Image (tube, rainbow, N blue to C red):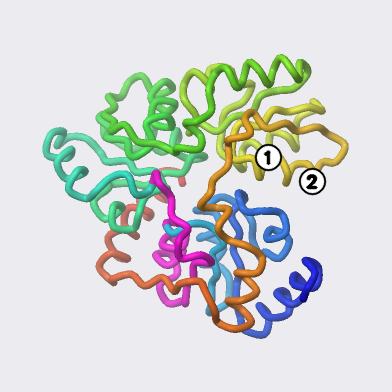
Amino acid sequence: MLTTAEMQQEILKLKREKDFCVLVHAYQTHDILEIADFVGDSFGLSKQAAKAAHKNVLMCGVRFMAETAKILSPQKNVYLSSPFAGCPMAEQMTVNQIKALKREHPEAAVVCYINTTALLKTVCDVCVTSASALEIVKNIPQKEIIFIPDINLGRWVEKQVPNKKFYFINGGCPVHMSVTADDVKRAKSLHKNALFLVHPECKKEVTDLADYAGSTTGIMNFVANSQNNEFIIGTENSIVQHLQFKYPEKRFYPVSKNCICTDMRLTTLADVYGILKFGNGGEEIVLDQEVIKEAGHCIDQMLKYGG
């Protein structure tokens, strides 16, 4: 039997011995963050993997993140820590749906959130992250935008780009969409001095009440630069824990006890240990070369326009 600390030390040793770069999304639990080579948002992790010298990459996150890492590092062996860790938002739409939308609006650019499958990216024009979506939509030449899959992030961008026409499908993150305005008002009534920081995947009625709306990294940067000492966090509740570790002198409160991604919770520290020690569990990500090429073009366009 190993303690958490002993298992972490074994993992740190094993990843060096077996030439693994361990990527950990910020929504993972803190014991997993502590053994990471890189921690961050999904696309930032994939960029770090592409720069790293390691031949093997382990993504502690969900499937579309591991696919993105493979697209950016096709020569590397990329593994997903839990084969069952998907993203409901990434899987909400099909290639045929998007092709039909393109036929309806032939002058529109299809802008896809990074939270989409590799296959879906092959029929999109440009990819965005929550941090880069506003800048990229402003910069691309098209005046009409098909924004998929997240209607909440899309409408948050639309509000700030009134000179462009937007089309949506009613998709989004079930976890962030579960947060209500009543949740925010309740949290604010309990913590009157706290600023409310929210992810734009939440509904408009929620982001309208925010002191700051932005990506997970943006939220954490806001805390780092703020003189305030109390914050209500409107994104996955793991961020509350990470901020508590990083800024123990400050107070952090979840906007809702229900803001938990069950797919992110599928990965455990023992999963990481098992993959590195015994080759058990996990799944190697294998993508068709044509998918890598076409989805890669969508990501290249993101970098061109401000990603």
The secondary structure type at the circle numbered 2 is helix
x%, y% of residue 233? 66, 32
Estimate the spatial distance between the alpha carbons at disc 1 and disc 2, rounded to whole Å.
10 Å
Work out which residue is located at the far front of the displayed protein and give it. Answer: 1
Name the residue located 32 percent from the left edge and 35 percent from the top edge.
Answer: 147
Name the residue located 61 percent from the left edge and 20 percent from the top edge.
Answer: 184
User: Badge 1 is on which residue?
Assistant: 220
Q: Which mark is residue 246?
A: 2
The disc, 1 or 2, on the residue closer to the chain's N-terminal end is 1
Frontmost residue, 208 versus 180: 180
202 lies left or right of 96? right
123 lies left or right of 12? left
Residue 87 shown in magenta: yes
Name the residue located 72 percent from the left edge and 59 percent from the top edge.
Answer: 31
Work out which residue is located at the far left of the displayed protein and give it. Answer: 103
56 lies left or right of 94? right
The secondary structure type at the circle numbered 1 is helix
Q: Amino acid at mark 1?
A: Met
Dot 2, how many residues are within 10 Å of its Cα: few (below 14), some (14-19), or many (20+)? few
Frontmost residue, 286 versus 186: 186
The reply to whether discs 1 and 2 touch (Cβ–Cβ < 8 Å) is yes
